[in-house]
Amino acid sequence: MDFGVAYTQEQQEFRQEVRAWLEENVPDNMRVPADIRKYTPEMHEFWKAKHKELGKRGWLYPTYPKEYGGGGLSADHRAVIEEEMAEARAMGPISSTFTMDVLTVWGTEEQKEKFLRPLLQGDISDHMRMTEPHSGADLADYRGRAVRDGDDWILTGENVFISAHGDEDLLPGPMLTDPNAPRHRNLGYFIVPNPSPGLEVKKMNLLVGDRQKNIIMNGVRVPGDHLVGGDHQGWQVHGTHLEAEHGGGGRAFPRDLLVDQLVVWVKETKRNGGSVGDDPIVQQSTMDAYLEAHVDGVLGKRAYWRYQSGLGNTYEGNVHNVHSRVSGLRNAVRAREIMGMYAYLDTYDPLAPNDGAQEVAQRGAAGQRHAGGSTNIAKVILARRLGISRTKEQAAPTPATMRSGGS
């Protein structure tokens, strides 16, 4: 069975247009490196400028509505853009689409003009902030406080492990507005301007590098129109964000580049007068990795198709989310067992395969299983969606369900 997309003639012409733009606009020294440690400030400024150009073309966030600055393009057009950008090693959007989903569903018209439009155009950027030092991924135990002061709010709290560049213009996320209200009815969702008096963004030197940030808010004042939804509605608002982060939007172009590189390495690396792949155990392990990667791709495409078709995802996105987590970890172990010490050669070692991509993946597999909530939480959410948990859970509202008339 062929799971490939049958593109129309118009879409193939669009692909050529995107490819030509990338060839003309992306010099070799600005292509995204395998290791984020080689992503320089000059690259960052270059891509921020290029994203503004992509935003004007409608290619930065292609499937969001034109009326708010998106491209108004089809799901297939988005898949073409992501595929071509990946092939060109171009930097994808800096901002998180999770915030754009929140603003699309919950924002007022004024907030959409103030925040959503410039985000979709690439004129500003954002990154969500969630994890707190005391509770990890338990957002229902959020303690960072938001206290009303006239028409404004005063925010005090701290976030850790935030995967931001640090210079984003907006840092949205929940805050505790009413400590006496019950869980899930005691939060507000605030968009915090960066920089702001009392706001500090610090690098965290972790296993995966220093991309993660520690965000400290000490009496940060934000205007009332920076609260999205009601002041006790933050959990519900944030649910739209989490729906996407937990796989609800699927993936337009699910490709496991590291597994593809592993297959090439096994085929081309010589050992004992033949290739590494001559070993039947290596063959079996490599094919297990290849199969898992392609199963994960099919699951991602299914969730993406359902989302973009307006059908929504009840459990399908969560299946992809959980499978991607566990299969990614298993494949990292397989790559380490097959490649041996070559999997640990970093980007600065001339013998490192693929510019050290496998070493980056090994560190990421060890340190990033918590991203978007830990894997055990992802499994609990999936169990609730499948109806086999003591509690049940319905999908949160998304832009897709709004388009299709769902609730």
Image (spheres, rainbow, N blue to C red):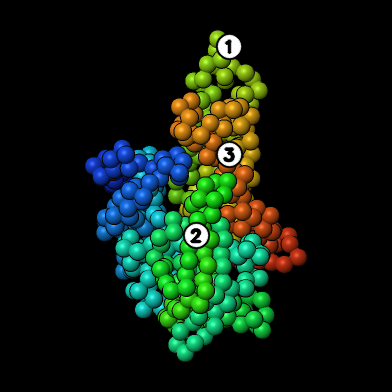
Give the CA distance from mark 2 to mark 1.
50 Å
- Kindly tell me whether residue 97 is visible in this rendering: no
- Kindly tell me whether residue 226 is visible in this rendering: yes
Q: Is residue 287 above or below residue 87?
A: above
Q: Which residue is mark 2?
A: 202
Q: Which residue is mark 1?
A: 272
Q: Quadrant of residue 27?
A: top left
Give the mark toward the camera: 2 or 1: 2
Q: Secondary structure at mark 1?
A: loop
Which residue is at the front of the view, 283 or 169?
169
Q: Say whether disc 1 or disc 3 marks the residue closer to the N-terminus.
A: 1
Instruction: Count neighbours of disc 1 (C-alpha within 10 A) and say few if under 14, some if 14 to 19, many if 20 or more.
Output: few
Q: Secondary structure at mark 3?
A: helix
Give the CA distance from mark 2 to mark 3.
25 Å
**Residue lying at 42% horizontally and 72% vertically, measured from the top left:** 196
Q: Which residue is mark 3?
A: 362
Q: Secondary structure at mark 2?
A: strand
**Residue lying at 53% horizontally and 61% vertically, measured from the top left:** 214
**Residue lying at 58% horizontally and 46% vertically, measured from the top left:** 207
Q: Give the image location of residue 268, x and y in percent.
A: 49, 20
Q: Say whether disc 2 or disc 3 marks the residue closer to the N-terminus.
A: 2
**Residue lying at 48% horizontally and 25% vertically, measured from the top left:** 351
